[in-house]
Image (tube, rainbow, N blue to C red):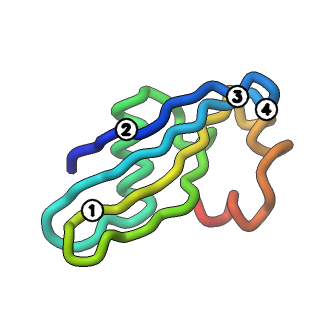
Amino acid sequence: MDFNFVRYERNEDKCRTEIDFVATYTGPVPSRKELLGQLALFYSFAEDTAVLDRLRSRAGRGGVRGSLRVYDDAASLKRYERAEKKRRR
């Protein structure tokens, strides 16, 4: 799986880093867990401090566009994310 990072921005007010990316792959569409694991390896963060949001598959192109928010700690994630977003991780 290859990643192209479109936007990397630090949000100090909410203690997080916001990343927009495009992932290209061959074969079946990767799961949210697989994407989060690959991104965690690339950026060296703990998976329990990140939330994947807005995943959109690019039909017929072998790619998915998404948004990732990486918090400084689990307490910040709990404070700023809604419950349904935390469950989807």
The disc placed on residue 63 is 1
Q: Residues within 10 Å of mark 4 (few under 14, many from 20)?
A: few
Local SS, label 3: strand
Q: Disc 4 and disc 2: Cα gap in Å? A: 21 Å
Residue designated by label 4: 14
Q: Disc 1 and disc 3: Cα gap in Å? A: 27 Å
Observer-nearest residue: 20 or 39? 20
Identify the residue at horizontal 69%, vertical 61% (top origin).
Answer: 85
Q: Earlier in the sequence, mark 2 or mark 1?
A: 2
Identify the residue at horizontal 48%, vertical 63% (top origin).
Answer: 55
Of marks 4 and 2, the one in the foreground: 2
Identify the residue at horizontal 73%, vertical 67% (top origin).
Answer: 84
Check whether the beta carbons of the residues at disc 3 and disc 4 lie within 8 A of each other.
yes
* Vertical comparison of 2 with 55: above or below: above
77 with respect to 28 (left or right): right
Observer-nearest residue: 46 or 23? 23
Q: Earlier in the sequence, mark 1 or mark 3?
A: 3
